[in-house]
């Protein structure tokens, strides 16, 4: 027959919660920190025995069966324990008497700027031009003899055109930051500080109540006929 101490040693070596991994909000802190809670349970019920075991079972079987029975027990009492946790227990990270004196601010800041792209275009078109000239000169034996040489020149017209188009550009910027602040502004009274202290220890009282429930339903003390093995 295996004692609570032996089951604790077995589960510790196998990194397994001794009191199950029941998925309840009020049991979440145990699942996260089961090593510490199992050590407390072992110290309270060191030489007690899980009564639903036989001599033929191995330590693996006894440890698994005990965890399953604990999970079933917690499931049966879920409504009761949920309400008790709500009115009695307080999250441990809410305990901080020094918050009244220490203030910490953490600023995580991210800035960024994005420049838009721009494309400019230019076009130049030269108009056409036509020039003409006429020269008059006659040899001495021409029928149409010109006494004077003459030159006529005509310049054609030309029209040039050009355009310049500027592209558009849009710039954008952003700034994001997260500020975390912890602490209380002002001074708490002695009564306020003591209430925090009492609420903190109430969470431990809650788990002691759950432990006593498990012990009452599933454990038995050493009696004649059971061979205690360390």
Image (cartoon, rainbow, N blue to C red):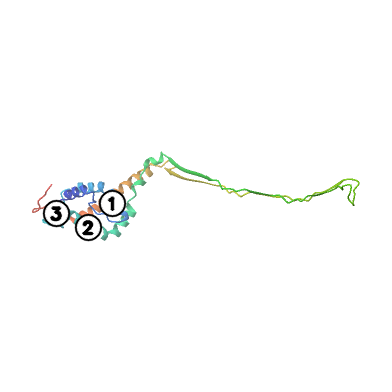
Residue 76 percent coordinates (x, y): 26, 61
Q: CA distance from mark 1 to mark 3?
A: 25 Å
The residues tagged by marks 2 and 3 sit, at their Cα atoms, a distance apart of: 15 Å
Q: Nearer the viewer, mark 2 or mark 3?
A: 3
Q: Residue 58's mark?
A: 3
Q: Earlier in the sequence, mark 2 or mark 3?
A: 3
What element does badge 1 sit on? helix
Q: SS at mark 3?
A: loop
Q: Residue furthest right?
A: 147
Mark 1–mark 2 CB contact (< 8 Å): no
Give the x, y percent position of residue 46.
Answer: 17, 48
Residues marked 2 and 3 touching at CB (< 8 Å): no
The answer to whether mark 1 and mark 3 are in CB contact below 8 A is: no
Residue identifier under label 1? 31
Crowding at label 2, few (<14), some or many (≥20) Cα neighbours within 10 Å?
some
Q: Nearer the viewer, residue 135 or 113?
A: 135
Q: Which residue is mark 2?
A: 68
Q: Is residue 116 left or right of residue 134?
A: left
Q: Give the image location of residue 205, x and y in percent.
A: 28, 49
- Residue 37, position in %: x, y? 25, 48
Q: Is residue 138 left or right of residue 157?
A: right
The answer to whether any part of residue 201 appears in the image is: yes
The foreground one among 100 and 174 is 174
Front position in the image: 58 or 172: 172
- Residue under the image location 34 percent in, 54 percent down: 87
Query: Which mark lies nearer to you, 1 or 3?
Result: 3
- The disc placed on residue 56 is none
Q: Is disc 1 surrounded by few (<14), some (14 to 19) or many (20+) residues within 10 Å?
A: some
Local packing at callout 3 (Cα closer than 10 Å; few below 14, some 14-19, many 20+) is: few
């Amino acid at each position: 027959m295996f004692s609570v101490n032996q089951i604790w040693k077995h589960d510790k070596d196998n990194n397994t919660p001794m009191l199950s991994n029941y998925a309840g909000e009020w049991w979440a802190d145990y699942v996260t920190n089961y090593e510490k809670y199992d050590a407390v349970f072992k110290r309270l019920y060191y030489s007690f025995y899980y009564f639903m075991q036989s001599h033929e079972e191995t330590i693996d079987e006894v440890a698994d069966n005990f965890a399953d029975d604990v999970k079933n027990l917690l499931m049966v009492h879920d409504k009761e324990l949920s309400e008790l946790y709500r009115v009695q227990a307080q999250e441990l990270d809410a305990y901080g008497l020094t918050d009244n004196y220490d203030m910490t601010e953490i600023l995580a800041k991210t800035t960024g700027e994005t420049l838009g792209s721009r494309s400019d275009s230019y076009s130049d078109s030269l108009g056409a031009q036509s020039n003409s000239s006429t020269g008059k000169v006659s040899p001495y034996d021409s029928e149409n003899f010109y006494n004077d040489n003459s030159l006529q020149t005509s310049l054609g017209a030309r029209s040039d055109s050009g355009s310049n188009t500027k592209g558009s550009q849009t710039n954008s910027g952003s700034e994001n930051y997260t500020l975390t602040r912890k602490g209380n502004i002002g001074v708490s009274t002695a009564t306020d500080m003591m209430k925090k202290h009492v609420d903190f220890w109430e969470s431990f009282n809650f788990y002691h109540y759950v432990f006593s429930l498990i012990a009452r339903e599933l454990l038995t003390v050493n009696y004649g006929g059971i061979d205690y093995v360390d």
